[in-house]
Image (cartoon, grey):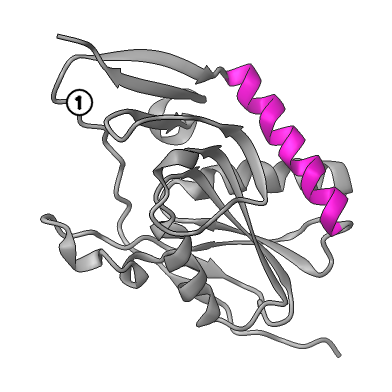
Amino acid sequence: MGEEYLAYTIQYPDLSQILLLSQPMSKLVLLSSVQLTHTISRLAYQLIENHGDFSQSAIIGLQPRGIYLSKRIVAELENILGHPVNAGTLDATFYRDDFRQHKEPILPQATDLKFSVEGKKVILVDDVLFTGRTIRAGMDALLDFGRPSLIELCVLIDRRFSRQLPVQPDYTGRVVDTISSEKVKVEWSETDGSNQVILFSQEPE
């Protein structure tokens, strides 16, 4: 008789992400829809190289934007492997070390883990790796659900020169060298009506 695990599901109101541009900005498409599709496929195959049939591994998307990337990676993995893989979502809002420093209150999102992470190899997924604070918070939040044997990080965009914590991805879609005033936005069809990655830069006066 198989083991049964308690399903942790916490649902909160959805909070859409809005990019506020107070000054004129130029726009550069870093990844088109087609390029994004190819990138996700490549990431899936790289994950299979290290995790095989995923029987001892799990994909967990970090709220709020990492869940869209994880959803697509999971779909690609299941299409290649021919069977379901362990997948869930994790909210780390209250684990961030800068949580109380925001002027506006931050609303938490949904945490949905219907499996035990104890002893598993866990891949945390986020869309953009910037300062590293979200990833650190995600690891702290994950440990409240058990102790994985391994934690890896998969991101679509790595803004490598913007790190505030020593966090590096194990799987990267694309590395982008940016300055702090530039904005990287990953657009998903569910929230933005399109699938692409855009770099916004302030236009010179």
Q: Quadrant of the N terminus?
A: bottom right
Residue at the image point whose x is 61% and y is 46% from the top? 71
Picture residue at 52% right of the left edge, 77% below the top = 8
The quadrant in which the C terminus is found is top left
The location of residue 144, given as percent across then percent down, is 50, 82
On screen, residue 200 above or below 56:
above
- Amino acid at dot 1: Leu
- Residue at the spot of label 1: 21
- SS class of the residue under badge 1? loop
Q: Magenta segment: does it hold 37?
A: yes
- Compared to residue 101, the image places residue 190 above or below, namely above
Locate residue 45, reporting x and y percent.
81, 41
Q: Residue furthest left?
A: 103
- Segment colored magenta: 33-51
User: Magenta span has 125?
Assistant: no
| Most frequent secondary structure within the magenta stretch | helix
Residue 79 position in % (x across, y down)? 81, 42
Answer left or right for 190 relative to 155: left
Residue ID at (39%, 29%): 192
Up/down of 31 relative to 165, above or below: above
**In-image side of 90 versus 202 (left or right):** right
Residue 179: % across, % down: 35, 31
